[in-house]
Amino acid sequence: MEPMNDEATISRLEQLLEDSIELAEENNKLLRSLLRSNRIAFWAKALMWIIILILPFILLGPLVRTLVPAADTSKAGSVFGFPSPTEIQNIVNSYRASTTNK
């Protein structure tokens, strides 16, 4: 091989290596920027969903607290506001009595 050709090859390889290093550094910057953007987007979405899920409780809480006593029709014998079996039987008996009297 000719010495001139070897120098040209070495010079070309050095240039390719420098270009490769430059591209790798640029790629690294882009990847770090992408990672930072993804982290910001994740926390922004998490904050948005926290606000969407909790804000109604904060805003509607006083309204619900004022309406609950007005809607409280529960009696001592009932569970979760449903009538007890004896209350149901009393209702059935009163209905039967009212229909047989007519």
Image: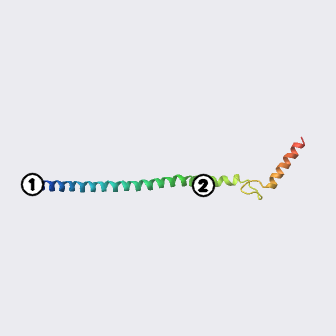
Residue labelled with disc 2 = 61
- Residue at x 65%, y 54% (from the top left corner): 66
Q: Residue 42 lies in what quarter of the image?
A: bottom left
Helix, strand or loop under label 1: helix
Residue 11's x, y, as percent? 15, 55
Relative depth, front residue between 18 and 43: 18
Residue 44's x, y, as percent? 44, 54
- Circle 2 or circle 1, nearest the eye: 1
Relative depth, front residue between 78 and 72: 78
Tell me the tag on residue 4. 1
Relative depth, front residue between 22 and 29: 22
Residue 52's x, y, as percent? 52, 52
Q: Residue 28 lies in what quarter of the image?
A: bottom left
Helix, strand or loop under label 2: helix
Tell me the tag on residue 96. none
Say few, some or many: other residues with alpha carbon within 10 Å of mark 1 (under 14 / 14 to 19 / 20 or more): few
- Residue at x 88%, y 46% (from the top left corner): 97
Q: How is the image coloured?
A: rainbow
Residue 33's x, y, as percent? 34, 55
The amino acid type found where label 1 is placed reads: Met
Relative depth, front residue between 54 and 36: 36
- Residue at x 82%, y 50% (from the top left corner): 91
